[in-house]
Amino acid sequence: MKWTVAELHKYQYEAMTFDKTIDLAEELKKADSEIREVSPIRVQGRADVDSDKAAFHLHITGAFTLPCSRTLADVEYPFDIHSIETFSLNPLNYQVDENEEIHEIVGGVIDLKPVVHELVLLEVPIQVFSPVAEESSSLPSGQDWKVLTEDQLYEAREREKKKIDPRLADLAKLLQKDEDEKQR
């Protein structure tokens, strides 16, 4: 996944296509401790090269193995990424659009591996649920604790507001008795 600038200039008037499979499992697992496994990553695409820049149209596919947010069971999470990454071949002549991100060329070589690493890492979801956890309506619980949905939490708070403090129960009865006498 590396090309020198001289190699890319050979494709200046025609599209260069590529289809590679790379293994980034160890690097990705080090970067994010939630990742348990990563399948080999397939990187397909083409490069459009002109005298000032090289634009790589990437299609990246693979799958993560991540822990379920409820049960911690392994969940396979596929990813399918489309991206256009631009490298400046001649930084002095190329006008940069403010919305465009330009990658630096180090030592006259374009290396797509760090770019693919970054794009794949950005695809890791915050939460993932196993099919069993999605189908189950019960949430995890234990001694003196349980997981609630937002609706369940709202209902529990409303019930708590309506409860009378047991220390003030006799006072509430006395006030109710006064109210009943006033209405007669």
Image (cartoon, grey):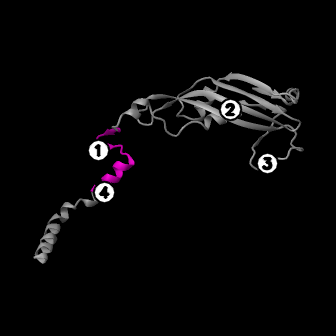
Q: Nearer the viewer, mark 1 or mark 3?
A: 3
Calculate the distance from the C-alpha at mark 2 to the C-alpha at mark 4. Answer: 49 Å
Mark 1 and mark 4: span between their CA atoms? 20 Å
Q: Which residue is mark 2?
A: 116
Callout 1 crowding tier (Cα within 10 Å): few <14, some 14–19, many ≥20: few
Residue 158's mark?
Answer: 4
What residue is shown at x 15% (from left), y 73% (from top)? Answer: 179
Q: Which residue is mark 1?
A: 144
Pointer 3: what residue?
A: 97
In the picture provided, is 113 more to the left or to the right than 95?
left
Highlighted range, magenta: 139-159
**What amino acid type should be assigned to the residue bearing mark 4?**
Glu
Few, some or many residues within 10 Å of mark 3 (<14, 14–19, 20+) = few
Amino acid type of the residue tagged 2 in the rendering: Val
Of the two numbered discs 1 and 2 on the same chain, state the one appearing first in sequence: 2
Dot 1 or dot 4, earlier in sequence: 1
The residue at the point 34 percent across, 48 percent down is 152
167 horizontally vs 24: left or right:
left
Q: Quadrant of residue 170?
A: bottom left
